[in-house]
Image (cartoon, rainbow, N blue to C red):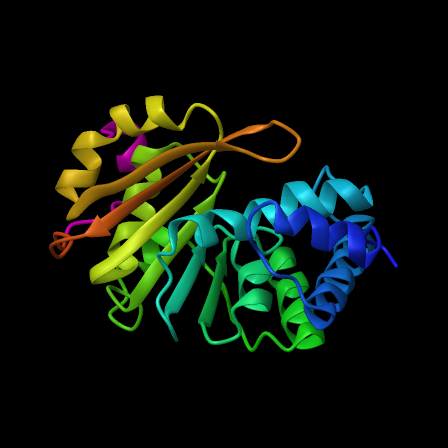
Amino acid sequence: MTLTEYDKVRELFSQGSIDLSREQYERLDRYAQLLVDWNTRMNLTAITDPWGIAEKHFFDSIYPFYMAGIVPERAKVIDVGTGAGFPSCPLKIMRGDISLTLLDSLNKRISFLTELSGELGLEAECIHGRAEELGRNAAYRERYDIAAARAVAKLSELCEYCLPFVKVGGAFAALKGSDGQAELKAAENAVKTLGGKLELCREYTLPNGDGRTLIVIRKVSSTPEKYPRNKGQMTRKPL
């Protein structure tokens, strides 16, 4: 097995009041195996030790959503710039009721995610594309209950990437490091301009002491049609 044994991972998860079943553990273990295997051929993660994967990828992906309780039953979730599937693939293993879309701009990562989804039975829609383009597509725009992103870009840009996907009444969840408060202050105008309102900014630590910040932005009005802009416009004139 690639992960630390079940009892230790279950104890880790219990620190976040997360009840991990044996079946969920086995799926996470298979996830870890695939992650390490694919990582020998392409850059998916710098964290490859069993305990690091369990804590810094799996626990770190799942705990914020359990802590905040923001994912409704049978929610439609889109993970923007998902990379190796974090945070939403571990969440899907714990919450089989959600419907999941994985979006990434690198086709090699989509190949990994497609295999991962098939192996683990996630039934995720895996899309190779750019958020600033897909967010203008009527089939995806304002169609999701939750948009999630973990360590993709600074928050002001993330809002422009993610909020167009969220339906009014839904939420954007940004999983940030210990500097999340500063990013939030710099993103205040972006949040307002794109139809969002701050619902939660909570600092916490992983069991190993690493600092994290969960930022939840509720969608209170439709995003103006001109957003998202292309990457060049975002860079030249940030919100």
Residue displayed at 28% across by 35% down: 234
Residue 132 appears in view:
yes
The answer to which quarter of the image holds residue 237 is: top left
Q: Depth check: 155 or 96 in front?
A: 96
Q: Residue at x 59, y 35 (%)?
A: 206
Q: Which residue is drawn at 62% across and 53% down?
A: 84
Horizontal side of 59 relative to 75 (left or right) equals: right
In the displayed structure, 133 sits above or below 212; it is below
> Could you say where residue 27 lies in the image, as x and y percent from the top left?
72, 68
Up the image or down, 12 lies above or below 22; here it is above
90 horizontally vs 162: left or right: right
In this picture, residue 112 sits left or right of residue 65: right
Q: Where is residue 119 in the image (x, y as percent from the top left)?
A: 71, 74
In the rendering, at what x and y percent does residue 20 appear? 65, 62
Q: Can residue 230 be seen in this view?
A: no
Work out which quarter of the rendered image holds the C terminus and state it.
top left
